[in-house]
């Protein structure tokens, strides 16, 4: 061993040629060649192609050394993306070489290439079984090579074939072999769980092996297996616990902690025994990694209960110190664990706000990115503005962090590149923490308006266009949910609309902006200017924005020409023409929805404009009555996301029971006689709503405007009443109106819809005037009632209307999935190993016969299964043939059946001759025949 | 378990690509490029050794079963011009893997005495051998530098003995026809170098 520390030249030289004395020279040539031709990709590709064709020649050489050399080079070239599965047969030949170094090359190549081709594995099975036998002096090495090689390529059939050999090796006198055999068994168990069931004790006995490396391997294998199926290993817990208590090897302790994490997830009884031990371990260990894994085990193994503040604090305190470490790795993983603890109970981490703020300014952006996820846990009313400020400050391309290096005096400025991904995450986080729990953390909506404006400006340059929708959505939400802030919010929206850059770079934000403008166009004094602005711009937005824009324009127009300040008819004509010319090209839009809406709108406006020509006096009825009736029927209330979809499945159309019983009909008819209005055609809602929900909706149906600069306007009341009646009629005739008790809504809706049409103070927001909103009398009485309930919050936020029971935890269809351009699963790498272990039932009674026959039974089964499969295929092809004869007598079909018969050999032929002349075909085929005899 | 070990330099030239979980070859190459792209943007002096944003090849879309690659971590360490990258799942401890990379490099250092990228370029097979003694089929089998190096030595030495015996047998005329053939071929090939 001492020579290892001071290696002689000879030793070094030896190590450098592991696969034989001369082999490396030729591989070296290849490597040198690659280096020499590295200037341009074209040149390199040319060289590699040349090298590859040389390898093809060499692999076909009868000379084993040349063949080995070629295989070695091909193995190397796989690194550059050149597939070598065509050479699988040559690899098999090299594997079967009697020379250990050649065998080594063979197994190395096989481990890299054989998984692609189950056929070659069938041929290789016997060879591997032979190599696993222990016969002579150098066999330790030989067996070792075989074990290393086959560990990566085990298939179900190979697993059944070699598992007995591997179990025999568990009793080898050499720890090296035991260790490798037990590791190789892992993949065997994945493919062939029966082996584990039938030899469980034999396998578990290795946990008590004298050699630590074998114990380590056994623990590792059990750990990996328990991830897939923890049940069978729970019985080992006492033994594993013993090892955990006694062993000093940190590597094994970490593995055991991982293992116990897996077991504890399914067996809660482990917790009382394990937890004290792990806490003890945390106190005694000096190794950071063990300490970290202990906490990890507690958290991930479900050992931390929601109300266990004691343990949580023990863990968090440690993590807190880790987060102050100078090692970014430690800071990062601690941050991740922090998040996981916070997920168990947010209250655990709420006191660590200072730490989170510090991590938000970490020198490592990936740590900041994790810390961002923690914000949700620590945010509250008081620190929200501070946190958002910290985040907004980071919207620069290069941040500079002062880092202390070495002593306390020397600090260095380190420029940090802020990646776009992180910026996107910041925008989303800001929106999330502000809007969470129905804007619970926001005390100042003016501030939030400003934040949203900032976000809109900042998001322009980011590639995630979904951000536009999110910001727009926020503007729309506060527009709807915070009635007292509507004027301010609409000012922000108009600001957004006027900003050319946002229009160009972030058009997705406009969708909800336009909607809000349309819906609340009563706030806008000079709708004509707004319409002219949009139509003058002649800019065509994305289809989904235009879909919203068209009705919004109509709404604005409607509200403008009916506003109480008399509007000049000429002006209206002008705007009408403008609108028409704007809509005209949209009638030919490629987007169906846009086209349809444009045409509808256009036709109506054409009628209106004709009516105006005829009517010299005043406005035509079309504009004064019909148009507003399109939109002003009822007021919209916020409902939670996905409610509409849920409702659709709740609608029960009952075609059997009459709407009204005879009695009710009479009652209605008599009532109708009293009513002068032509309302009341439908007195029952077609929409069936849960009783519980309609009652609870009443509770929500309270709107308060604490902050409104109330100015009572008596004159409005009359108008209000008239409007109210009309609205009620419409409401009742609309089956999709989310109905509440009538008398109740009449009160509630008043407050929201009946803003005065009077142009009050004109707040000059980019030329668009806002109407001053007024409140009716009811408002004040209502407010009195509400003021008791009112907490310190200044602004009332409407909560979502409850329409359907939310108890059913049906997944709310998230808009997220609509907008994130989720790349399809196709073309992804899946690192999941297909295994039968997860579903394997270990409780099955062991087969009465000894295990070896047991597994051979299964082998027989699989063979008979194969035959069945073959039979089935044959039948299928026969049927196909018949069909082919029936439809056409194409010669190709006949040929196909022939090919199937010789499927295997022809397939191999194809592989070997791909890109080769047919001359070589015979050669290769001969080769394979020859080897097929020797190997099998 | 460990799914893959990738070693590449700062120009994205591969030095070792080892997958313990089958991955389609062109994807391997693509993954290497994506991992390189992500790692090369990072500052190894101040940033952690974990790739936080996974390469797009490993991210799962929201539509498919999203838990598939959720626990995959990419852990890397930078030594001079080389990046040693391990793709592992959640059964591996992050800190332990960092230690393992250190062990790997120490073992290489002992094999080459003062290892450099050039050593590894021209001795790819040694790199493979050392890794083979540390990881077998995605499982760590040894973490002791001395054990690892002596195992590699033993493998190399064994071959020498074996070769020697073949030559000796051949020279004394006891070899089988096959052995004579192979060693004859060997000599022929060697002289061609």
Image: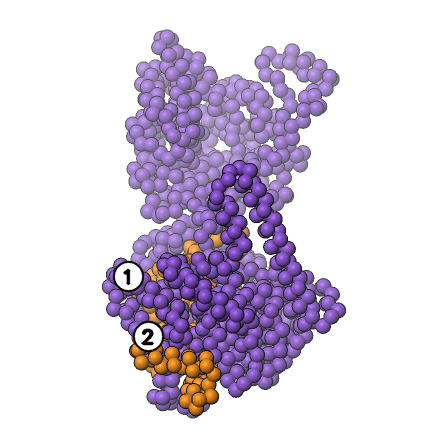
Chain colours: A purple, B orange
Classify A160 as above or below A759.
Answer: below
Examine the rendering and report whether any part of residue A295 can be seen.
Answer: no
Q: Which mark is residue A46?
A: 1
The quadrant of the image that shows the C terminus of chain A is bottom right
The percent position of residue A840, horizontal first and vertical second, equals 65, 61
Q: Could you say whether the residue bearing mark 2 is in a helix, strand or loop?
A: helix
| SS at badge 1 | helix
A173 vs A105: above or below? below
Using the image, name the chain to which the residue with label 2 belongs: A
Q: Find residue A582 and report its horizontal and vertical position in percent.
A: 33, 24
Relative horizontal placement of residue A373, taking residue A307 as reference (left or right): left
Q: Residue at x 45, y 54 (%)?
A: A828
Q: Which mark is residue A26?
A: 2
| Relative depth, front residue between A521 and A914 | A914
Is residue A680 shown to the viewer in this render?
yes
Q: Evaluate whether label 1 is on the same chain as label 2.
A: yes
The CA distance from mark 1 to mark 2 is: 19 Å
How many neighbours does mark 1 have within 10 angstroms: few (below 14), some (14-19), or many (20 or more)? few
Lower sequence index among marks 1 and 2:
2
Q: Quadrant of the N terminus of chain A?
A: bottom left
Residue located at (59% from left, 82% from top):
A172
| Residue A597 against residue A357 in the figure, above or below | above
Q: Is residue B59 left or right of residue A700?
A: left
The image shows residue A597 at horizontal and vertical percentages of: 43, 25
Q: Nearer the viewer, residue B79 or A740?
A: B79
Q: How many marks?
A: 2
Between A872 and A27, the one lying in front of the other is A872
Give me the disc on residue A300: none
- Among the 4 quarters of the image, the one containing residue A700: top right
Q: Closer to the camera, A498 or A244?
A: A244
């Amino acid at each position: 061993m001492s020579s290892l520390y001071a290696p002689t030249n000879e030793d070094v030289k030896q190590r450098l040629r592991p696969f034989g004395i001369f082999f490396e020279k030729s591989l070296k040539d290849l490597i040198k060649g690659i280096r020499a031709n590295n200037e341009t990709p074209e040149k390199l590709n040319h060289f590699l192609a040349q090298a590859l064709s040389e390898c093809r020649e060499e692999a076909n050489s009868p000379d084993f050394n040349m063949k080995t050399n070629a295989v070695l080079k091909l193995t190397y070239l796989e690194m550059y993306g050149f597939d070598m599965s065509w050479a699988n047969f040559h690899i098999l030949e090299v594997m079967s070489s009697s020379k250990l170094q050649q065998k080594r090359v063979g197994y190395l190549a096989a481990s890299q290439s054989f998984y692609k081709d189950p056929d070659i594995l069938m041929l290789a099975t016997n060879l591997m079984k032979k190599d696993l036998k222990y016969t002579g002096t150098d066999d330790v090495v030989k067996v070792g090579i075989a074990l290393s090689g086959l560990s990566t390529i085990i298939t179900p059939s190979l697993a059944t074939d070699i598992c007995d050999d591997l179990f025999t090796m568990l009793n080898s006198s050499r720890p090296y072999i035991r260790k490798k055999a037990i590791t190789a068994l892992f993949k065997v168990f994945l493919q062939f769980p029966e082996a584990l069931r039938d030899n469980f004790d034999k396998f578990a006995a290795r946990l008590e092996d004298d050699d630590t490396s074998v114990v380590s391997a056994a623990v590792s294998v059990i750990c990996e297996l328990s991830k897939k199926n923890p049940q069978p290993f729970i019985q080992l817990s006492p033994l594993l616990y013993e090892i955990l208590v006694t062993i000093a090897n940190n590597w094994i302790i970490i593995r055991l902690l991982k293992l116990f994490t897996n077991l504890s997830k399914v067996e809660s009884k482990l917790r009382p025994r394990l937890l004290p031990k792990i806490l003890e371990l945390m106190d005694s260990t000096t190794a950071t990694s063990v300490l970290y894994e202990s906490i990890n085990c507690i958290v991930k193994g479900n050992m931390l209960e929601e109300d266990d503040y004691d343990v949580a604090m023990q863990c968090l305190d440690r993590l807190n110190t880790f987060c102050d470490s100078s090692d970014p790795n430690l800071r990062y993983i601690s941050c991740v664990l922090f998040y996981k603890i916070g997920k168990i109970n947010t209250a655990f981490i709420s006191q660590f706000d200072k730490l989170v703020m510090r991590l938000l300014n970490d020198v490592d952006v990936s740590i900041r990115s994790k810390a961002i996820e923690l914000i949700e846990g620590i945010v509250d009313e008081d620190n929200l503005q501070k946190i958002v400020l910290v985040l907004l400050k980071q919207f620069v391309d290069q941040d500079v962090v002062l880092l202390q290096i070495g002593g306390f005096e020397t600090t260095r400025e380190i420029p940090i590149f802020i990646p776009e991904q992180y910026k996107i995450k910041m925008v989303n986080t800001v929106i999330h923490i502000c809007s969470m729990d129905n804007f619970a953390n926001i005390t100042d909506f003016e501030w939030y308006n400003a934040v949203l404006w900032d976000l809109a400006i900042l998001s322009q340059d980011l590639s995630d266009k979904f951000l536009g929708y999110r910001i727009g959505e926020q503007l729309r939400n506060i527009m709807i949910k915070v009635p007292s802030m509507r004027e301010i919010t609409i000012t922000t929206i108009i600001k957004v609309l006027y900003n050319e850059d946002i229009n160009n770079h972030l058009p997705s934000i406009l969708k909800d902006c336009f909607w809000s403008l349309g819906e609340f166009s009563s706030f806008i004094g000079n709708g004509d200017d707004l319409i002219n602005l949009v139509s003058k711009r002649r800019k065509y937005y994305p289809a989904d924005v235009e879909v919203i824009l068209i009705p919004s324009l109509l709404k604005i127009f409607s509200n403008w020409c009916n506003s109480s300040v008399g509007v000049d008819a000429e002006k209206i004509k002008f705007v009408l023409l403008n609108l028409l010319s704007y809509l005209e090209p949209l009638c030919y839009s490629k987007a169906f929805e846009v086209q349809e809406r444009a045409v509808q709108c256009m036709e109506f406006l054409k009628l209106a404009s004709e009516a105006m020509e005829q009517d010299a006096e005043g406005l035509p009825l079309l504009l004064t009555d019909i148009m507003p009736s399109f939109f002003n029927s009822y007021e919209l209330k916020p409902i939670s996301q996905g409610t509409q979809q849920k409702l659709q499945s709740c609608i029960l159309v009952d075609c059997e029971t009459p709407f009204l019983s005879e009695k009710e009909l009479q009652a209605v008819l008599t009532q109708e006689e009293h009513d002068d209005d032509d309302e009341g055609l439908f007195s029952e809602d077609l929409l069936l709503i849960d009783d519980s929900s309609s009652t609870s909706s009443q509770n929500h149906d309270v709107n308060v405007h604490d902050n409104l600069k109330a100015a009572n306007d008596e004159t409005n009341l009359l108008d209000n009443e008239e409007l109210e009646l009309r609205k009620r009629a419409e409401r009742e005739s609309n089956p999709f109106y989310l109905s509440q008790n009538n008398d109740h809504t009449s009160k509630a809706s008043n407050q929201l819809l009946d803003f005065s049409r009077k142009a009050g103070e004109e707040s000059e927001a980019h030329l668009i005037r806002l109407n001053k909103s007024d409140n009716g009398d009811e408002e004040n009485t209502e407010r009195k009632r509400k003021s008791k309930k009112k907490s310190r919050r200044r602004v009332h936020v409407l909560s979502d209307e409850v329409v359907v029971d939310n108890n059913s935890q049906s997944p709310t269809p998230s808009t997220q999935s609509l907008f994130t351009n989720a790349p399809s699963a196709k073309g992804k790498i899946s690192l999941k190993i297909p295994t039968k272990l997860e579903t394997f039932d270990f409780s099955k009674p062991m087969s009465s016969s000894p295990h070896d026959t047991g597994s051979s039974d299964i082998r027989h089964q699989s063979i008979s299964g194969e035959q069945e499969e073959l039979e089935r295929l044959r039948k299928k092809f026969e049927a196909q043939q018949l069909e082919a004869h029936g439809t056409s007598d194409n010669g190709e079909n006949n040929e196909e059946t022939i090919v199937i018969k010789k499927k295997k050999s022809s397939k191999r032929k194809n592989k070997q001759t791909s890109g080769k002349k047919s001359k070589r075909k015979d050669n290769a085929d001969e080769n394979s025949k020859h080897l097929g005899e020797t190997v099998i | 378990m460990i799914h893959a070990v990738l070693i590449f330099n700062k120009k994205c030239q591969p030095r070792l690509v080892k997958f313990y979980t089958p991955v389609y070859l062109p994807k391997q190459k693509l993954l290497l490029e994506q991992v390189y792209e992500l790692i090369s943007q990072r500052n190894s002096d101040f940033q952690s050794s974990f790739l936080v944003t996974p390469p797009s090849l490993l991210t799962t879309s929201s539509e498919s079963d999203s838990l598939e690659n959720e626990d995959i971590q990419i852990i890397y360490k930078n030594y001079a011009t080389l990046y040693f990258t391990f793709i592992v799942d959640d059964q591996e401890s992050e800190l332990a893997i960092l230690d393992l990379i250190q062990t790997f490099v120490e073992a290489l250092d002992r094999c080459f005495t003062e290892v450099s990228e050039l050593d590894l370029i021209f001795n790819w097979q040694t790199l493979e051998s050392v890794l083979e003694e540390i990881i077998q089929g995605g499982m760590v089998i040894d973490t002791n530098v001395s054990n690892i190096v002596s195992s590699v030595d033993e493998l190399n030495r064994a071959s020498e003995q074996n070769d020697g015996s073949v030559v000796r047998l051949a020279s004394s005329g006891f070899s089988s026809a096959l052995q004579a053939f192979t060693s004859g071929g060997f000599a022929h090939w060697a002289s061609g170098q």
